[in-house]
Image: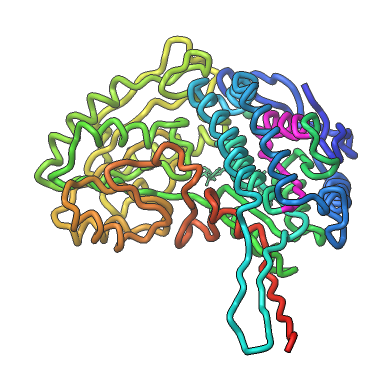
Amino acid sequence: MRKHHFIGNAWCEASSGETLPIIDPSNGAEVGQIARGTAQDVDAAVAAARRAVGETFDGPWGVLSASERGRLLYRLAAAVQDRIEEFALLEAQDTGKSIKTARTDAIFLARYLEFYAGACDKLHGDTIPFQTGFTVMTIREPHGVTGHIIPWNYPIQIFGRTVGAALATGNACVVKPAEDASQSVLRLAELAAEVGFPAGVINVVTGYGHEAGACLTAHQGIDHISFTGSTATGRLIAQAAAERHCPVTLELGGKSPQIVFEDANLDEALPVIVTAIVQNAGQTCSAGSRLLVQRSIYEPVLQALAERFRALKAGPPHLGLDMGPLVNRKQYEQVKRILAKAEADGLQVMARGALHPEAASAGYYQEALLYRDVPHDNSLAQQEVFGPVLAAMPFESEEEAIALANGTDYGLVAGIWTQDGGRQMRVARKVRSGQVFINNYGAGGGVELPFGGMKSSGYGREKGFEGMLGFTVLKTIAIRHG
Ligand code: NAI
Ligand code: MG
C-alpha cells in the first residue's frame, strides 16, 4: 500500500506526514492509506510539471515532437493492455464496482490512451487567406501545465480521456484523484515512468478535495483545469479559476432522460435502459435516470422493466454481479436520504432488485429500484441520485416528451427510442443535451465521441478528437512578406 504522492517520476512522502484511509466499500474495512496532500505537495508537483514542459516548451517533454509523444502514449496504452486485471482489481477495491465493470474500465483506459496516441500528430492549425503579401497561420499550442481533478466513479477512464488528451497535445499534468479512489491513478503514473515518460510529465498528488484539490485549482502555475464531479464543486472550481483567468472544462452531473415512443423496438430498448441506470450502481454522470414512456405503452413497458429490475443483484465486486456497493458511507447516506424523501412524498416503488447473501452488512449496498408515476417536479425526477434508481413517468405527445426531457437543470445525455426517422431527428434537435443517442445509449463507451454538457451539466468537451482542442491554445501568426 502506498502512502506517497508520485511527483517527478518518484514516490514522495506527504509533507504533512498525514494519511487518509483507503476504505473497501464492499465491507467497510480499512485496507491501506494514501497521503494527505498539502499546498507544499501541490507546489512540488506543479514545479516538476513546469520543468518537464519548460518555460518556453524547452523542457525534456516540451521539446518532443508530436509523433514522439504519440509513441510514448502507445507504450503506456500497451502496458495497460497487458495489465487489465491488475487495474481492474485496484479499481474494484477502491470503488467497490463489480469486477466486470472494472475490467471494462481498464480496457477503455487502454483505448483512450491508444486513441490519443494516434491523434497526437493529426492535430494541426490552418492557413488563412488574407491580404496579398501576407501568409497567416494558426498553431495549436499546449497550455503548459494542466490540472486534473478526477472523481471516484470512473478514475481510470477519466484519467484516460483527460490526461490522455492533455498529454497528446503536449501538456504536463498534475492529477488530484478522488480521496476515495487514488490507487489506480498512482499506479498509472508509476507505469508511465516505467515505459519512459520523462520526469514531471504525470504527477499525482492525493488527498482531500478541499485541501489538495483546492490548492491545485488556485495554483498560479496551473494553466488549465479539467474537472469531473458534482455541480456544487464544479462551481467552486470555476470561481477559483476565474480569479486568475484560468480556463476550465467542467463535466458535471445529469438527470438524463430515456424517451420511449410507442413504436420503439422494446426488445432492444429495455435491456439498454436497465444497464444505463444500474451500471456502476447508478454512479455514472450519464446514467439514464429518467424514463419517459408514451402513455399507450406505459403499462406494458413498466411491467417488463419491473421483471428485469427484480432479477438485478448487488454484491461484492469479485462476484461480478450487476452491481457492487456504493462508493462510500457519504454516498450511501445521500441515496438513503433521497429515498426517504421519496417515501414521504408517497412515491411508489414498483420493483426492487436484491442484495446477494454475500453482501456484508457493513458494506454500502443499495438494491436497484424502479419508481413509477413520478411527478415531473418531484425531486426524484429533478435531482441526481447517483444510485441505481430509475424514475418513470408517462407522456402523451412528442411535444410533451421534449418539454419533460428538457425540464431539469441538467443537459448531459438523452436517449430516444423510436423507429420513425423524422421523429428521431426532430427530437434529437430539440433536446438540450451534449449527446443524443437514437435507438442506443452510451454507444459502447464512446471513446471517439465528443462528450460534455449543456446547462448545469457543465461546459467544454472531452473524448474524441474534439477533446484535444480544449487542452490547446490557438495562436495566430501573420507574416507580411510582400
Ligand atoms: P465532488 O465533486 O466533491 O468530488 C469530485 C472530485 O473533486 C474529487 O477528486 C474531490 O476530491 C474533488 N474536490 C472536492 N472539493 C473540491 C474543491 N473544493 N476544490 C477542488 N477539488 C475538489 O463529488 P463527491 O462529493 O465525491 O460526490 C458528490 C456528488 O457529486 C455525487 O453524489 C454525484 O451526484 C456527483 N458526482 C458526479 C460525478 C460525475 O461523474 N459527474 C462524479 C462524482 C460525483
Ligand atoms: Mg474507497
Task: Please determine whether, in this image, residue 122 is positioned above or below residue 88.
Answer: below
Is 6 left, or right, of 226 in this rendering?
Answer: right
Look at the image and tell me whether residue 462 can be seen: yes
In the image, residue 24 lies at what x, y percent?
62, 22
Task: Please determine whether, in this image, residue 370 is positioned above or below residue 168.
Answer: above
- What colouring method underlies this structural image? rainbow
Q: Quadrant of the C terminus?
A: bottom right
Look at the image and tell me whether residue 214 can be seen: no
In the image, residue 118 lies at what x, y percent?
61, 44
Nearest the viewer among 311 and 374 is 311
Identify the residue at image location x=75%, y=29%: 191
In the image, residue 314 lies at what x, y percent?
43, 21
In the image, residue 138 lies at what x, y percent?
66, 71
Q: Quadrant of residue 481?
A: bottom right
Task: Please determine whether, in this image, residue 133 is positioned above or below residue 283.
Answer: below
User: How many numbered circles are shown?
Assistant: 0
Identify the residue at image location x=67%, y=29%: 184
Residue closest to the far top:
357
Is 332 left, or right, of 376 in this rendering?
Answer: right
Is 406 left, or right, of 321 in this rendering?
Answer: left
Identify the residue at image location x=54%, y=52%: 465
Instruction: Examine the structure image and report whether residue 324 is included in the region drawn in magenta.
Output: no
Q: Quadrant of the N terminus?
A: top right
Residue closest to the far front:
482
Nearest the viewer among 482 and 236 is 482
Magenta span = 170-192
Q: Quadrant of residue 220?
A: bottom right
Identify the residue at image location x=14%, y=57%: 397
Instruction: Examine the structure image and report whether residue 181 is included in the region drawn in magenta.
Output: yes
